[in-house]
Image (cartoon, grey):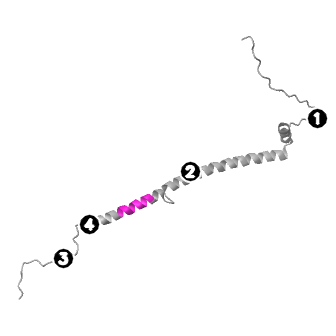
Amino acid sequence: MPRETNRPTPRRKTKALKRPGQGRRLVHLLLLFLASLIVVNGLIGDRGLLAMIEARRQNSELTQAIARQRADNARLREDARRLREDPTAIEEIARRELGLIRPGEKVFIIKDLPPPTTAGR
């Protein structure tokens, strides 16, 4: 029968001594680095927060420009309709822009005079 001894069994020596928790700390640092990269990319990436804010601003500007163009187009359509259908509109433009008059009308041209000077004061 073999003899039992209370001696501890010898452990094998490892090549490098590791501190307890060193691997866990490295994993935490790696996860922190990856999380930082994701946050930075989320803020300034191609589809990040800043790009989204800029896209919303551009969208708002373009929406306003489209509304102005639509209003201008509606005004021009109305002007074109009036010129096709309303003879008084054509007459109004001829009088205003071309200075035309009807036969028998008299034109009075009034020039602005300088204000009178007061010599006695």
> What is the CA distance from the residue labelled 4 to the residue labelled 1?
106 Å
The image position of residue 69, as x and y in percent, is 69, 49
Residue 103 position by quadrant: top right
The image position of residue 65, as x and y in percent, is 65, 49
Q: Are marks 3 and 1 in contact (CB under 8 Å)?
A: no
Specify the quadrant that holds the N terminus: bottom left
Q: Secondary structure at mark 4?
A: helix
Label 3: which residue? 13
Tell me the number on the disc at residue 103.
1
Kind of residue sitting beneath label 4: Gln
Label 2: which residue? 57
Q: Are marks 2 and 4 in contact (CB under 8 Å)?
A: no
Q: Closer to us: mark 3 or mark 1?
A: 3
Q: Earlier in the sequence, mark 4 or mark 1?
A: 4
Q: Earlier in the sequence, mark 3 or mark 4?
A: 3
The image position of residue 52, as x and y in percent, is 52, 55
Q: Reply above or below: 20 against 86.
A: below
Residue 82 position by quadrant: top right
Q: Are marks 3 and 2 in contact (CB under 8 Å)?
A: no
Q: Reply above or below: 65 against 19.
A: above
Q: Residues within 10 Å of mark 3 (few under 14, many from 20)?
A: few
Q: Which of the two residues, 45 or 77, is positioned nearer the viewer here?
A: 45
Horizontal side, residue 82 vs residue 50: left or right: right
> What is the CA distance from the residue labelled 1 to the residue labelled 2?
58 Å
Tell me the number on the disc at residue 22.
4
Specify the quadrant that holds the C terminus: top right
Q: Residues within 10 Å of mark 1 (few under 14, many from 20)?
A: few
Segment colored magenta: 31-40
Q: Earlier in the sequence, mark 2 or mark 4?
A: 4
Kind of residue sitting beneath label 1: Pro
> What is the CA distance from the residue labelled 3 to the residue labelled 1?
122 Å
